[in-house]
């Protein structure tokens, strides 16, 4: 792999992470109540993705500056959907708009429209039963066949 390929891969990863943060901000705010528990989860996910607090604040202030981006990697795409459903569920109050948005993200990420609701519900149930990302991935793999 050439250095330019590595650099492009890094840049794509960073822009995908920024897009993911934008999506999470949108999910947290869609019900009109951006709670402290949602913000705490957002900061945790930002750190995991190499996004600083100042970068996160910039994304929150100017979300329209960030383009929506679907990760090329299936594993990362699932992790991002998992995070979005986690954001929907973290305040233990699921608003109908959050559910609609999570279904929309599943479809935008390339999952079949016919299974989007079931996929989101399966992820949600695993999160509420404190199942890990990997346990959830294994459970939904049957659904994705």
Image: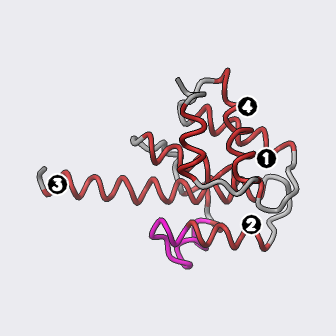
Q: Under tag 2, what secondary structure?
A: helix
Crowd tier of the residue under label 1, counting other residues whose Cα lies within 10 Å: few below 14, some 14–19, many 20 or above: many
Determine whether label 1 and label 4 are within 8 Å by CB. no
Residue found 59% across the figure and 36% down from its top: 140
In the rendering, which numbered label is found on residue 98?
Answer: 1
Gap between marks 3 and 4 measured at Cα: 40 Å
Circle 2 residue: 38
Q: Nearer the viewer, mark 1 or mark 4?
A: 4
**N-term mark: 3 or 4:** 3
Whole-percent x and y of residue 109?
54, 36
Judge whether 108 appears above or below 14 on screen: above
Q: Which residues are magenta?
A: 46-59
Q: Quadrant of residue 112?
A: top right
In the rendering, which numbered label is found on residue 117?
Answer: 4
Q: Nearer the viewer, mark 3 or mark 2?
A: 2
**N-term mark: 2 or 1:** 2
Q: Nearer the viewer, residue 74 or 11?
A: 74
Judge whether 76 appears above or below 44 on screen: above
**N-term mark: 3 or 2:** 3
Position of residue 5 in the picture relative to residue 85 (left or right)? left
Q: Under tag 1, what secondary structure?
A: helix
Q: Main secondary structure of the magenta part?
A: helix
Determine whether label 2 and label 1 are within 8 Å by CB. no
In the rendering, which numbered label is found on residue 4?
Answer: 3
Gap between marks 2 and 1 measured at Cα: 13 Å
**N-term mark: 3 or 1:** 3
Q: Under tag 4, what secondary structure?
A: helix
């Amino acid at each position: 792999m050439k250095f330019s390929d590595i650099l492009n891969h890094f840049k794509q990863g960073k822009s995908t992470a920024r897009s993911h943060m934008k999506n999470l901000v949108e999910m947290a705010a869609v019900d009109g109540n951006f709670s402290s528990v949602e913000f705490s989860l957002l900061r945790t996910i930002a750190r995991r993705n190499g996004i600083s607090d100042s970068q996160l604040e910039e994304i929150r202030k100017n979300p329209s500056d960030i383009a929506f981006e679907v990760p090329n990697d299936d594993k990362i795409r699932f992790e991002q959907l998992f995070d979005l459903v986690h954001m929907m569920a973290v305040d233990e109050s699921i608003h109908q708009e959050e559910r609609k948005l999570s279904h929309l993200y599943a479809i935008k990420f390339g999952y079949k429209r016919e299974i989007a609701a079931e996929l989101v519900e399966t992820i949600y149930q695993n999160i509420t039963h404190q199942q890990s990302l990997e346990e959830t991935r294994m459970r939904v793999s049957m659904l994705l066949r």
